[in-house]
Image (spheres, helix red, strand yellow):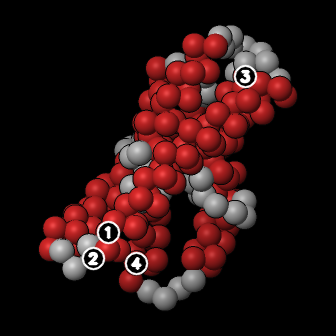
Amino acid sequence: MSSGTIVLGVADWLSLLGHYLSLSLLCVGGALTTAPDMHRFLVQEQGWLTDRQFSDSIAIAQAAPGPNVLFTGLMGWNVGLNAGGLPTALLGMLICLVGIMVPSSILAYATAQWSHRNRDLRAVRAFKQGLAPLVVALLVATGWILATANGYEIGNWHTWAITAVTTLVVWRTRVHLLWVLGAGAVVGALGWV
């Protein structure tokens, strides 16, 4: 998809904003946990981004310094670029960032105030503990979307084996994550994946 290949009207921009406003309220564990639904909406349903643009948006934003929510702005930027160029890219970035940030920030502030006042209630403690499996499942779904969008299907066993070994190393050892990333870069440069 190149610049100017999609046409977005006012209703489309409002749809994009509405989608990100609703996803904002589901950002339990961070905006990255909503990436599967962003993929469904932007790539599969609307066709505003390609799989490659979607995955690259997340990868570039995660590699850059700063908050990890930047990938949402980059997705909006790419939607805008696909719709016409710099002015629409800025509009797309603004819509996505405002949409994902404002409702969740207001909800987080209000909830933090309330839960701090009621932190000793059993229901509050149970709710916080119950969120952990949900966050883990959403992150696994995000990983699955990113892996399969780049062609890493189940039959590509060596990639999945490296993923499993990396997961175990990070989980069970004190090896710094940068060493694991460096090893991944070497494996990729050698063409093993």
Q: Left or right: 95 with respect to 46?
A: right
Mark closest to the chain's N terminus, 3 or 4: 3
Mark closest to the chain's N terminus, 1 or 4: 1
Label 1, label 3: how far apart the Cα atoms are: 43 Å
Q: Amino acid at mark 3?
A: Asn
Q: Position of residue 191 (x, y in %)?
A: 65, 55
Quadrant where the C terminus sits is bottom right
Q: Amino acid at mark 1?
A: Ser
Kindly indicate whether the residue at mark 4 contacts the one at mark 2 (C-beta within 8 angstroms): no
- Which residue is located at x 79 percent, y 18 percent? 84
- Local secondary structure at mark 1: helix
Mark closest to the chain's N terminus, 3 or 2: 3
Crowd class of label 3 (few under 14; some 14 to 19; many from 20; radius 10 Å): many
Q: Left or right: 22 with respect to 73?
A: left
Residue assigned mark 4: 171
Residue assigned mark 3: 82
Label 3, label 2: how far apart the Cα atoms are: 47 Å
Q: Position of residue 37 (x, y in %)?
A: 42, 36
Label 1, label 4: how far apart the Cα atoms are: 30 Å
Select label 3 or label 2 by which is in front: 2
Q: Position of residue 157 (x, y in %)?
A: 41, 52
Nearest the viewer among 118 and 156 is 118
Residue assigned mark 2: 119
Residue assigned mark 1: 115
Q: Quadrant of residue 160?
A: bottom left
